[in-house]
Image (cartoon, helix red, strand yellow):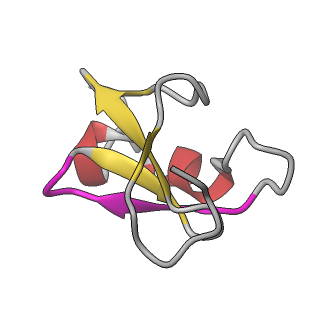
Amino acid sequence: MTQGTTSGPLGLDPLLLEVLACPDTHHSPLTVDEAASELVCTTCDRAFPVRDGIPVLLLDEARPRGGTGTATP
């Protein structure tokens, strides 16, 4: 048994969540949307999927959430 292997939201390591940022040029921190299994950029309002506990931080894989961010549809 390995000590310190507790997983956070969406099965992601809490320390990893602290350093993940949007891959777009502004590099904003990402927040967790557990209901949608996504990581959300607080600036551009893109949602990045988390598949099998792995965040997919590719701009081509992100979807615009249509909220108050600056992303264009």
Which quarter of the picture shows residue 67? bottom left
What residue is shown at x 37% (from left), y 41% (from top)?
A: 12
Relative vertical location of residue 46 with respect to residue 11 in this rendering, above or below: below
37 lies left or right of 38 = left
Relative vertical location of residue 39 with respect to residue 58 in this rendering, above or below: below
Q: Foreground residue, 67 or 19? A: 67
- Residue, far front: 73
What residue is shown at x 63% (from left), y 47% (from top)?
A: 20
What residue is shown at x 65% (from left), y 62% (from top)?
A: 29
- Residue, far left: 35
Q: Position of residue 1 (x, y in %)?
A: 26, 25
Membership of 11 in magenta stretch? no
- Residue, far bottom: 68
Q: Magenta residues?
A: 28-36
Q: Foreground residue, 40 or 17? A: 40
Q: Position of residue 11 (x, y in %)?
A: 26, 39
Q: Foreground residue, 57 or 44? A: 44
